[in-house]
Image: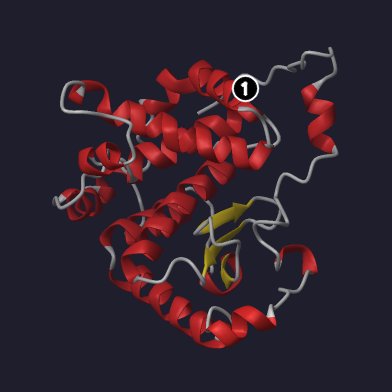
Amino acid sequence: MTVKNEEKRDESGNSQEAALNNEDLWGSDMYPERRGKKFQHSWFKILLGAQGRESIDKNRCEHNVYKCIKESPIIKLMMGALRSSGCEIDIRRHISCEVCNPIVTGGYDSEFNQIIICQNSAHSEDMIRGVLLHEMIHMFDYCRNKLDVKNIDHLACTEIRAANLGHCSFMGSLLQGDSSFTNIKATHQNCVKHKARLSVMAVHKVSKEVAEAAIERVFTKCYNDLEPIGRRIRRNSFDMPRAYAEGYLYGYDM
């Protein structure tokens, strides 16, 4: 997957590309432990029980990560696809459980080629499996497709792919207001665009209109790119084990 890299300009005529070079795309407010920063405790939240259990959360998170990698068919497929594409992944080096802003459950740090699982917001094994799948798609795109997160079109594309392959069931889309029983045909695409837009806005700190424009520019191509899973995963279906069983057909090291 290759996205055309064109320089865009804002309303004042300034290059967005130049602005992004000075922008903290990673968002230290979302991931306070990144770049050597320390998580700041609040004594009030400790007294309420909302903080002060970071060691327990980290151990639980790491246990669930290990369990997903060993037992989840879709995560084993992603691990095999990464290895077969020349993208070695060591869970001790490339996956980190950390304290994050509560509004996020995970992230992918392309500078360190590392997946972040938010131990304080991704509590269950199912949530962590979803985060791993989403972020492993970003890792796959970074390694194999030369993802550049400073390019808003690249970012839009990988967010479309991650939402398309691992999220957006009909009921989930209905609950978040992206679909109704009268537009079932467009339900999945609406959900994918919604999730991708939120991520692009958060990472690049742009308006809804700018994010939507980037998504529309690349949507058709990126929505139809199903590699390395080969299918859209539906909730409560056999899609995950089927995708894993078919992995060898694509030459993945299973």
Task: Read off the residue under disc 1.
Answer: 210
The answer to whether any part of residue 158 appears in the image is no
235 relative to 195, above or below: below
Q: Nearer the viewer, residue 16 or 222?
A: 16
Kindly state the secondary structure of the residue where label 1 is placed. helix
Q: Quadrant of residue 253?
A: bottom left
Q: Percent from the top left, x then y, of residue 150?
A: 71, 35
Q: Percent from the top left, x then y, of residue 239?
A: 19, 48
Q: As drawn, is 143 to the left or to the right of 17?
A: left
- Decide: few, some or many residues near mark 1? Use Cα within 10 Å; few <14, some 14-19, many ≥20: some
Q: Quadrant of residue 205?
A: top right
Q: Quadrant of residue 14?
A: top right
Residue at horizontal 19%, vertical 56%? 241
The answer to whether any part of residue 116 appears in the image is yes
Q: As drawn, is 164 to the left or to the right of 237?
A: right
The amino acid sitting under disc 1 is Val
